[in-house]
Image: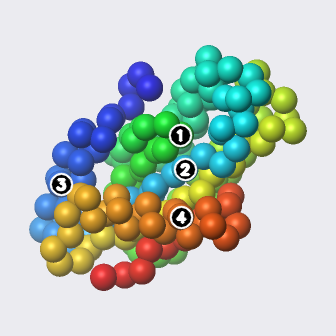
Amino acid sequence: MIGLPNRELLYDRLRQAIRLGARNNECRAGFFIDLDGFKAINERFSHKTGDRVLIEVGERLSETVRKSDTVARLGGDEFFVLAFGLEGKADACHLAEKLLKALRGPLAGVPSELLLRASVGICLFLFPGVMPANVVHRADMAMYEVKENLKDGYCLAPEG
């Protein structure tokens, strides 16, 4: 994905966010986003179409967040958003809704009956001993809660 940070750069930005958040006592949030229905697009149309969809997803996510936030592609159909300036759970849930809404629109070159949706796991972090891998893992586990139960939604990771 051209223009989006990879996992290595994301982890560097997470380390910086953890340090700044601890120093300024500010909440940060990580959003693990896994696309629902992407496999069907790849299988039915082609990997080339799938690649175009991934680019469009990256663009939509980037347009939805602040310029100071980070949108990264972890691999496959997985993305991660690192968000700053959140007051807490309510702000994180509001942003999750905005991200989901951005992904629900029609996709170029894909019939409307093949809907692309997403499962989002959220990890708020301002707790002692947090490491970048903890943030990603906790957000990933919360995302799996959504995948297993309803899809096209979000879940907050338990605190602490």
Q: Amino acid at mark 4?
A: Tyr
Badge 2 is on which residue? Answer: 34
Residue contact between numbered discs 4 and 2, judged by CB atoms under 8 Å: no
Q: Which residue does the numbered mark 4 point to in the structure image?
A: 144
CA separation in Å, label 4 and label 1: 14 Å
Which picture quadrant has residue 41? top right
**Residue drawn at (48%, 68%), measured in percent from left and top?**
142
Q: Residue at x 63, y 67 (%)?
A: 148
* Residue holding disc 1: 77
Front one among 85 and 98: 98
Gap in angstroms between the C-alphas marked 2 and 3: 23 Å
Gap in angstroms between the C-alphas marked 3 and 4: 24 Å
Label 1 to label 3: alpha-carbon separation: 24 Å
Which residue lies at the image location 37% right of the left edge and 67% below the top edge?
138
| Amino acid type for the residue under numbered disc 2 | Asp
Q: For residue 127, which numbered disc appears in the image?
A: none
**Amino acid type, label 3:** Arg
